[in-house]
Amino acid sequence: MTDSSSTHTQEPVLVIESGRTEKNYWADLWRYRELFLILAWRDLSVRYKQTIIGILWAILRPLLTMVVFTVIFSRIAKLPSDGNAPYALMVFAAMLPWSLFSNALTESSNSLIGNEKLISKVYFPRMIMPAATLITAFVDFLISFIILIGMMIYYQFAPGWHILLLPFFIILALLASLGPGLWITALNVKYRDFRYIIPFVAQFGLYVSPVGFSSKVVPEQWRLLYSLNPMVGVIDGFRWCILGGDSPIYLPGFLLSLAIIAFFLWLGVSRFRRMEKTFADLI
């Protein structure tokens, strides 16, 4: 005679425990990785599907900015390039990380507002949303990188071994945008005026960062202070990878930029997590 209890299928048990969500938050980010991919693919589809201007804008914006900066800073202001590198190439090598940072910051800071219906209905780690927008910015970067390759062929400028370290600085540019982006998108839920501030900050940052000029033109006694702008170290790193020895990295400033990026990443994550519980109510 068979024991009915031995053949009985065990029912799944739902455990309700105080703080369980908090303890498993980072594990949930991995469990919801498919949602991350879905959101990233959706953002890419919205930008590029059945449109020409999306791809064209990713090409024209950095290209036109490079032309304007080259004329103003090289032809009019007579500022020097880095070593023997063509001025236009030096500027475009800086436009790549700046565009990556600016696009990622803008997209991530508006990510929660653009998904308010999803937030109010379904639970998932909200950090997935601003993180997924980085993929769109990265695809724009890859499109612009094709232009850089064409420029290097045109100027017959071959990169050195430094180019192998470029992925590190790409990740650094994304992390530099993620920290402030997390904080701003959390504030954006409560104070909607922040969405008007980001475009101004991005535009202002373009001119105070060494995009149209080499950071070597900054007086030596001010270079460390100038590196409080975290994008200075990222931009100098990009130029070093692409232009090689013609654009050496200012090591004290680069280390300071790394510290600033790490600080804002910690600040952004902590502020985001603190405000995350109220998103569904406020949005």
Image (cartoon, grey):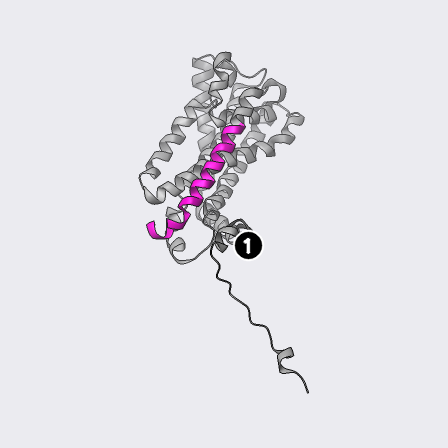
In this view, which residue lies farthest toward the bottom? 1
Image quadrant occupied by the N terminus: bottom right
Name the foreground residue: 73 vs 233: 233
Magenta stretch holds residue 273: yes
Q: Position of residue 258 (x, y in %)?
A: 54, 28
Residue in view at x 37 percent, y 49 percent: 278
Left or right for 260, reference 283 = right
Q: Secondary structure at mark 1?
A: helix
Boundaries of the magenta span:
258-283
Asked which quadrant contains residue 254, the reply is top right
Q: Is residue 51 above or below residue 179?
A: below
Name the foreground residue: 68 vs 163: 163
Give the dominant element type of the magenta stretch: helix, strand or loop.
helix
Name the foreground residue: 269 vs 178: 269
Magenta stretch holds residue 8: no
Asked which quadrant contains residue 199, the reply is top left
Residue in view at x 60 percent, y 33 percent: 168
User: Mark 1 highlights which residue?
Assistant: 31
What's under tag 1, amino acid-wise?
A: Arg
| Disc 1 residue crowd, few under 14, some 14–19, many 20+, Cα 10 Å | few
Q: Position of residue 14 (x, y in %)?
A: 51, 65
Residue in view at x 42 percent, y 27 percent: 205
Q: Is residue 201 above or below residue 10?
A: above
